[in-house]
Amino acid sequence: MKRLTAISLFTGAGGLDLGFEAAGFDTRVAVEMDARCVETLRANRPWPVIARDVGQVSTEELLKAACLAVGEADVLIGGPPCQPFSKSGFWATGEARRLDDPRATTIDHYLRILEEARPRAFLLENVEGLGFKGKDEGLARIREAVAAINRRYGTAYKPEIAVLNAADYGVPQVRRRLLIVAARDGARFRFPEPTHFGPDAERPGDNRRRWLTAWDALHDLPEPRDTALALKGKWAGLLPSIPEGLNYLHHTDRGEGEPLFGWRRRYWSFLLKLAKDQPAWTLQAQPGPATGPFHWKSRRLSMREMARLQTFPDDFMVLGSVSDAQKQLGNAVPSLLGEVLARAIRTQLLGTPITTEQPELLRETAQGTPPAEAATPVPAVYLALKGEHAAHPGTGRGFRAAARQTLAIAAE
């Protein structure tokens, strides 16, 4: 299979690059400013890494490191930091800062390099919040910038945009990402059809398979002995009382546990536990001590377990502590999703065939799933919380939002 060339921006721990690698692309240069991610990349792959902020890297330097001229790169890939557009920004206030956040300028740096390098194709990845209806000014900026590039240089990039759920393509994790793909010559891109289906879908009459589960991903890994995986903090003792696949809502007046919390008064991933027979929920990059998803054995996930859920190849070692690994892997694009997209890009836009029928990073399903772990009784220390608790009043109306509104009024 012919090897193609990729320029990688905001590379992180390399999740997207590993997918493109599996589809026959070579990362000719990567740009990443996080020191831990740089260590991980350099320890695992021979890719040249520019360890600086993308805003401080000229396209001339980038192309020189990649040994490529303007227009020679087959694809430009990358996911500018997503915090300005993330749904997590809605939890406390009902609104994310979006383009008012200075971190949103990372999109402009991606677009600058796109204009100056003019690859044959590009892929830009971000959170689905970038395209929320009525809040899609980030997408508008991208469309306008690409149109301006076309006018100035005679290119014909026509961005195709979709929000994909990684679980629909064989990733054992429910993770929705917004993808933008375009070709320099104007060829239209069709996003790959889902290959897997979830429990709410009617069983199709085609060859799609069920979603892969956490058990499919983790069943053949030995139980880790790392003491750093033990839970710490105020809520550590409560997690064993929550059944697989549930979170703190189990212990509300609408759940089947004890009424310890108000309905939806906590964030979704609070005391969230994996279930063997379901895909994982989205891995968090910087979780608090009670933020899941946690393993069904009521502990933190190991580096290798997180890497499996993100479909990184088993020969790839994410360096640092468990928290370092979680940050790197939680910020990554699932590698299998990257491979699926890379295979489509090379066949549809770059005119090069794929020699394998199945993606290299797709895992097989496990034979049988063990029963769920038994939940334990609530420890006595938490029973003091039993009582009536008010439900959350709605988005942007919680405790922190009310406090912010009070401060804003006082400041007027």
Image (cartoon, rainbow, N blue to C red):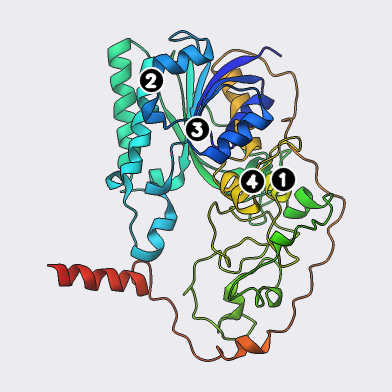
| Disc ID at residue 331 | none
Q: Position of residue 407 (x, y in %)?
A: 22, 70
State the count of labels: 4
Relative to 387, is 158 above or below?
above
Report the mark closest to the observer, 2 or 4: 4
Residue at 69% x, 26% y: name it. 22
Residue placed under numbered mark 4 in the picture: 320
- Label 4 or label 3, whichever comes before in sequence order: 3
User: Element under label 4?
Assistant: loop
Cβ–Cβ under 8 Å for marks 4 and 1 = no
Residue at 37% x, 27% y: name it. 56
Q: Would residue 237 be seen by someone viewing this image from the given angle?
A: yes
Report the mark closest to the observer, 4 or 3: 4
Residue placed under numbered mark 3 in the picture: 32
Residue placed under numbered mark 2 in the picture: 58
Report the mark closest to the observer, 2 or 1: 2
- Which quarter of the rendered picture does the N terminus lie within? top right
- Label 2 or label 4, whichever comes before in sequence order: 2
Q: Amino acid at mark 2?
A: Ser
- Badge 1, how many Cα within 10 Å: few under 14, some, many 20+? many
Q: Amino acid at mark 4?
A: Gly
Residue placed under numbered mark 1 in the picture: 308
Quarter of the figure with residue 40: top right
- Badge 2, how many Cα within 10 Å: few under 14, some, many 20+? some
Q: Amino acid at mark 1?
A: Arg
Report the mark closest to the observer, 3 or 1: 3
In depth, the one of 160 and 89 nearer the eye is 89
Cβ–Cβ under 8 Å for marks 4 and 3 = no
User: Element under label 2?
Assistant: loop
Report the Cα–Cα distance between label 3 and label 1.
23 Å
